[in-house]
Image: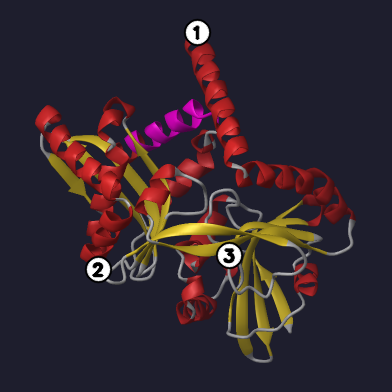
Amino acid sequence: MHVSIVHPRDLAKSDIERWRVLQEADPAFDSPFLSPEFTIIVGELQEQVRVAVLQDGQETVGFLPFERYPMGIGKPVAAGLTDAQGLVHVKDLELDPRELIRACGLGVFEFDHLVSGQPLLVGRHTRHPSPIIDLRDGYDSYVETVRQNSGKTYRSTAYKARKLQRDAGPLQHDYATTDRAALRTLLGWKTDQYRRTGRTDRFARPWIVELVERLLATDTEHFGGVFDVLRVDGQPVAGHFGLRTATTLAGWFPAYDTTYAKYSPGLIHHLAMAEKAAAAGIEVIDLGRGEKEYKEKLKNGEYEVMEGRVARPSAGASIHWALRVPVRKARGTVLASPILRSTADRALKTFGRLRTSLSSLAS
């Protein structure tokens, strides 16, 4: 096995075509986060992005996109943003994961959304469910499943959609729009949500805003950014920006105007998005790992992703273990307990309210 390390901009056209062939050959890789286009666009903004190109003789058998940091610490591309990570490879590929990360110049490779069936899995790792909206039998079949499993939610959402129209005006759903003004509105809602719930505001980092804008401008047969928005009387009230392959839409940044919170605009929007996505050829909407009430109400299936690391003896791996592993274990304990998770969520929201209040006073 020969491993070459290149920056995404240096991938040959034949490499990109081969990557796409391998991706389309296995349903496990059908995520836009594993598409070559995603890595290339992130690489335009983040110099630390690299791709390991694996060759067995004359055949290219795999591509591992990653980011390389000091002390030999490696992470997936756009770590912290992506819901699918891993090596895109030929079927039944056999390799030594530690030798692979050595060839990448890494002492450790950490992941938290590794897709199933990866030869990278070694040692201890944690499995997490990743809920999906499965549209392979069509939107009508999906809605029937929601009615059976979450009948109260479906009836309530339909009622609130009618009430919203009576109170505020007609509903309009624009799927795959390139309305940049509406996109900026969505990102503003998302920033408010991050702050309100005590989370880190991802859009405080300019490169992530630039990434979203570049992805919005990308639309090919195999990959593209998808922005859709729900409007009431012409005004945006909810929306979502995500990425797609030909058949999978990855849920990424959903948000809504809290002025309309009593109408559950997020649920109204997601059902409208699923209908339009199905009509556009999308078979699966990946809602992403995470315990969220709306995901439980909307899902009709789930995938599985892994959290853990591959490490070999090195100073960087030791430092990484000391800094990251205890924190990850503690977080896992909290997330596994409904009581602890609820307590932590309340604490974050309290912090968010305090932060918002202090920010208002300062301005």
Nearer the camera: disc 1 or disc 3: 1
Residue at numbered disc 1:
361
Q: What residue type is labelled 1?
A: Leu
Q: Earlier in the sequence, mark 1 or mark 2?
A: 2
User: SS of the residue at dot 1?
Assistant: helix
Q: Is residue 217 magenta?
A: no
Prevailing SS of the magenta stretch: helix
Instruction: Give the quadrant of residue 312.
Output: bottom right
Q: Residue at the location (54% across, 61% down)?
A: 84
Q: Where is residue 141 in the image (x, y as percent from the top left)?
A: 24, 66
Q: Nearer the viewer, residue 214 or 161?
A: 161
Residue 194 numbered mark, or none: none
Q: Single out the residue that lies furthest toward the bottom.
A: 57
Residue 8 numbered mark, or none: 3
Rounded to the nearest whole Å, what is the CA distance between mark 1 and mark 3?
45 Å
Q: Give the range drawn in magenta.
A: 185-198
State whether residue 40 appears in this view.
no
User: SS of the residue at dot 2?
Assistant: loop
| 351 w.r.t. 17: above or below | above
| 163 w.r.t. 82: above or below | above
Rounded to the nearest whole Å, what is the CA distance between mark 1 and mark 2?
51 Å
316 relative to 92 in the view: left or right:
right
Q: Is residue 190 magenta?
A: yes
